[in-house]
Structure formats: C-alpha cells, structure tokens
Image (cartoon, grey):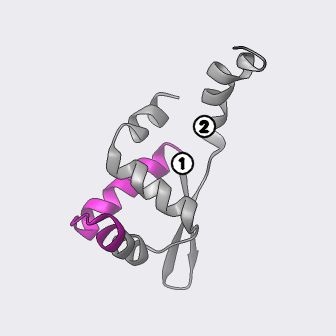
Amino acid sequence: MGDVFKALADPTRRTILDELTDRNGQTLFEICARLATKHELGLSRQAISQHLDVLEAAGLVETAREGRYKFHYINTTPLEPIVERWLKGREGAP
C-alpha cells in the first residue's frame, strides 16, 4: 500500500491517471501530447516515462505491447484496499 501512496503523492502522476481514466490505453506520445495541451505541462518524454514507471511499479498502470507501440492502462485494483480500509465501514454513517 505504501507504493500506492507514494505514487499518488505526486500531482503529475495523479494527472496522468486522470488522463488514463479519461482515455485508457494511450502510448507515451499520446500521454505527453495530452499533458502538454490539456494541462500545459511542459515535461520531457523522459520525465513522463519515469512517472509512468513509478505508477507501474505501484500497480496503478499496466502496459501492453502491440507491435512497436506500448499502451498504458489504468489499474484501480491497488486502490481497493484503501477504499475498504477507510470507506467500507462508513455505509450509513452520518
């Protein structure tokens, strides 16, 4: 769970996850373009690639190769223990 919190601590990584939520299955090039145009983030491809590596290490992003392209997909499974820990018992609570 610690890796998930570390990955989510960075606002750029949260923005990348937002982009993958909006449009899942993007290449690095597509993610870079969307971050630059929609969010005016002028990060290098290498910097975004490093952020994706952190997200992948935490299990929040999965990748799949198709030919010469590598597609990135959001994976919300690592968030389930967090939700269960703090929100499960709140059903019906004021």
Q: Which residues are magenta?
A: 35-60
Our reading of the magenta stretch's main secondary structure is helix
Residue 44, compared with residue 15, is above or below; it is below
Task: Estimate how packed mark 1 is, as few (under 14), some (14 to 19) or many (20 or more) residues with alpha carbons within 10 Å.
Answer: many
The amino acid pointed to by label 1 is Leu
Q: Residue furthest bottom?
A: 67
Q: Residue at x 26, y 66 (%)?
A: 40
Q: Is residue 47 magenta?
A: yes
Residue 73, position as x, y percentages in the image: 57, 62
Residue 84, compared with residue 61, is above or below; it is above
Residue 53, compared with residue 2, is above or below; it is below
How far is mark 2 from mark 1, CA to CA? Answer: 8 Å
Given residues 39 and 65, the one toward you in this image is: 39
The amino acid pointed to by label 2 is Leu
Which residue matches tag 1? 60
Q: Residue furthest front?
A: 94
Tag 2–tag 1 contact (CB < 8 Å): yes
Q: Is residue 44 left or right of residue 33?
A: left
Q: Is residue 69 magenta?
A: no
Quadrant location, the C terminus = top right
Which residue matches tag 2? 79
Q: Is residue 35 left or right of residue 64?
A: left
Q: Residue at x 38, y 77 (%)?
A: 29
Residue 9, position as x, y percentages in the image: 37, 36
Q: Residue furthest right?
A: 92
Residue 49, position as x, y percentages in the image: 34, 62
Q: Which callout, 2 or 1, points at the residue further toward the start of the chain?
A: 1
Residue 73 in sight here: no
Residue 1 in sight here: yes
